[in-house]
Image (cartoon, rainbow, N blue to C red):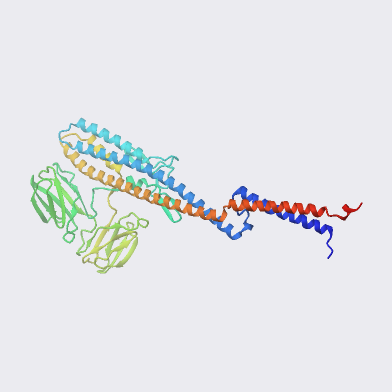
Amino acid sequence: MRIATARVYENGISGILKAQVKLDKTQQQLATGRQILNPSDDPAAMARVLELRQEIANTDQYQKNSDVAIARLNLEESALISASDILKRVRNLAIQANHAGLADSDRQTLALEVRQSFEELVGLANTRDANGEYLFGGYDSLTKPFTVNNHKVSYAGDQGSRFIQIGPEDQVASGDSGWEVFMDIPTVNGNGVFVTAPAPQNNGGGIIDPGVIVNLSDWRQDKYTLSFTTDDTYEVRDSKGELISGGGYRSGDNIEFRGIKTAITGTPIVGDSFTIAAIGPNTQNKGSAILHHSTVVDSSEWKQDIYTLSFSSERGYQIQDNAGTVVEVGNYQNGRPITFRGIQTKITGIPAVGDKFVISPGTKQDVFSTINTLATVLENATGLQSNTNVSSAVAQAIQDIDFAHNRVLDTRAAIGSRLNRISNAKDGNSYLSIQLNSSLSTLEDLDYSSAVSKLNLQTLGLQTAQQAYIKIVGMSLFDHLH
């Protein structure tokens, strides 16, 4: 077969170029440390490499998010520790103020310190992080959440909490709303079943506590009046004026009647009276049904309003809001839970047609109002009734401050739980990152020893091809003609 000289030249040059391409690829692999330089080198492996890179980038972002959340939660924890110290100080000041031997000027001095604590607490509630965002503003972290006008604190934030992604399916709240921490605090005024209160015309030093239910089956929902017939004897009458109970009084002793227990401390005088009023039933109810304590079971559906549950028949009921709109209808079963708008309650007993029960929001008060009320009482504590007024105010303030302090402690406990979650998530992300990088390295990283050996062979191959080409080019017939 005849082979043209041009064909020989082309084959030689083609071989040299192919060897150079392979050598160049190996050199690039050694320079970059990667065995896959282009998707066309290994499409399936390259697709997996891209997936791994995205997962690694996401994991790195989760770690950064975790660090941000830790910083914010640690700052919130520090602010709440300070808030806890302030509340303890105010509580101690209230106890100091409740001393009969104090002069008006002494209480004025204590009131001044209470006011200073008030200002400190507002400042803590407006704490900002390193980015200038307010910790307790909820979602609206750029608006100052708490403002003061004439000792009245207003909240401009919302009730949400910002969540940060710390894992593929894990989010954690990076803060708490100021509404939940400082504003929406239960008070001593009410236990969910009845409220106790002194008559405004009382002249003695008696102070009534909130009271508790000790036997719900004996409780009769009504408005009761506890009056002192002498300095050391009392009687209890219902809303119709019928005598229910009575006895001798001794400061701090329990007073029990119709399933409830309360106590009065101090020195009441003849004519002083206190009310124990139910917060739920209509006093005109004719049946024997009892409304039990209601709870919020779904805060996202709860709409704060006053609802009336009424019976249109012995087995049928409907629930209306304060505007008269029917929000729920159903059939009554003794003791079966009744749920509507995020609230769950129940009624036991036998209701009569037309019986009504009121389900209203529990008494709540912001901690600032609690402190302000205490300061105001101390500032105005003058005259013969000053000791009694202060004692009554201090009794309520101490319990309300305890409620607020418990809320702070509960929030701190929640923060600790979140920090543990974040720590566990970071550990998991670190382990996952190691595994992902290991998998990526297996697919992408170059085996240098193998690549260097390959480079040496390819270099030798290229040199051989070049020398062979030179030999072939030198084999022309014209070189042998003389």
Q: Is residue 229 above or below residue 334?
A: above
- Residue 213 horizontal side relative to residue 128, left or right: left
Foreground of the two, 399 or 312: 399
From the top left corner, tell me how far across and down residue 47 is, in percent: 57, 58
- Residue 416 horizontal side relative to residue 353, left or right: right
From the top left corner, tell me how far across and down residue 471 is, in percent: 79, 53
In the image, what residue occupies the spot 65% across and 49% down?
27
Foreground of the two, 316 or 23: 23
- Residue 421 horizontal side relative to residue 36, left or right: left
In the image, what residue occupies the spot 33% across and 54% down?
304
From the top left corner, tell me how far across and down residue 223 is, in percent: 18, 54
Q: Decide if residue 45 is in sight here.
A: yes
Quarter of the image for the N terminus: give it.
Answer: bottom right
Foreground of the two, 153 or 95: 95
In the image, what residue occupies the spot 20% across and 58% down?
283
Q: Which residue lies furthest to the top in this view?
A: 105
From the top left corner, tell me how far across and down residue 346 is, in percent: 26, 62
Q: How many marks?
A: 0
